[in-house]
Amino acid sequence: MPEGDTVYLSGKRLRAALSGATLLRGELRHPRLVEHDLTGRTVLDVASVGKHLFTRFDDGRSLHSHFKMDGSWHLYRPGMSWQRPAYEARAVLETQERVAVGFALHDMELLPTADESRLVGHLGPALLDPGWSDEHAAEALHRVTARADHEVGLVLLEQRAMAGVGNLYKTEVCFLLGLSPWTLVRDLPDPAAVITLSRELLLRNADRPEQSTTGELGRGRQHWVFERGGRRCLRCGTTIRVGEQGDGVYARVAYWCPTCQPGPTPPLRRQASRR
């Protein structure tokens, strides 16, 4: 599932391409929306909230989309070939100068703009909210610390606590703070640092497709431990371990350095080597 900065960047690019333009073609190919035609509508704005996108139109409606595991929005010039198969397209929004195609968007809804909170009102503060304030930080801290008996790795992924962190940033935040992902929130030495660093890493990568937590963009050097299972830790040289955190459909692969991140480890029955 994409991180919040990926969704933020998609929203930023869609906003620049579509805002203020009238749709010459507004096809919705999602099974629940095929009867709707957005042709003739003017795009007012595109906004991201955590991992959700809202494309807002001049008739008071918004098109909601969520990337899930494999969804994405692509931008083309009219007449250009698409990079993914046409049968994967769930939305085609074409203006005189640009064509925005939403591929493999499983969660889509057309709803009144005034009702957007129905879909995102349950979320915690969005870490990439342009209006982020001390109040947002305080609310995120309240929601995180209220989950005192939960593992910090799972809380970082919980969008109801704060919105925008995915498995990549969960992994790297835990490494940079020297925390085992299985550390309980009540045992965190500085819960506020978890929020501050999560936002800092997302902001660092919000305006580019490359996601680096090390400050380097070279292949194999972008992340400290994420997707580096079995390789040497870039900091201490210890072999990076791989495990599974969470249960059922919520299980996610976890990477950690046992030297740099001392603390609880997963039960042997939950060890995994899958990515």
Image (tube, rainbow, N blue to C red):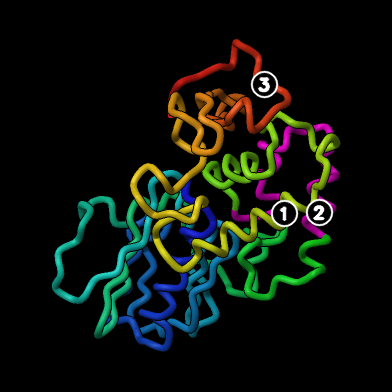
Residue 101: image location, x then y, percent: 30, 64
Q: Secondary structure at mark 3?
A: loop
For residue 215, side relative to residue 148 (left or right): left
Q: Residue at the location (59% across, 32% down)?
A: 250
Q: Residue at the location (77% across, 33% down)?
A: 150
18 over 126 or under it: above or below: below
Residue 26: image location, x then y, percent: 33, 73
53 over 150 or under it: above or below: below
* Nearer the camera: disc 2 or disc 3: 3
**Would you say residue 161 sits in the magenta stretch?**
yes
Q: Nearer the viewer, residue 118 or 180?
A: 180
Q: Which residue is labeled 2 in the image?
A: 141
Q: Secondary structure at mark 2?
A: helix
Region rendered in magenta: 139-164
Residue 43: image location, x then y, percent: 43, 82
Q: CA distance from mark 2 to mark 1?
A: 7 Å
145 over 25 or under it: above or below: above
Q: CA distance from mark 2 to mark 3?
A: 25 Å
Q: Which residue is labeled 3 in the image?
A: 265
Residue 175 visible in image: yes
Q: Which residue is labeled 1 in the image?
A: 195
Q: CA distance from mark 1 to mark 3?
A: 22 Å
Query: Which amino acid lies under the numbered mark 1 shown in the image of this protein?
Result: Ile
Query: Which amino acid lies under the numbered mark 2 shown in the image of this protein?
Result: Leu
Pointers 2 and 1 in contact (CB under 8 A)?
A: yes
Q: Earlier in the sequence, mark 2 or mark 3?
A: 2
**Would you say residue 77 sits in the magenta stretch?**
no
Q: Residue at the location (34% across, 46% down)?
A: 219
Q: Secondary structure at mark 1?
A: helix
Q: Residue at the location (42% across, 49% down)?
A: 106
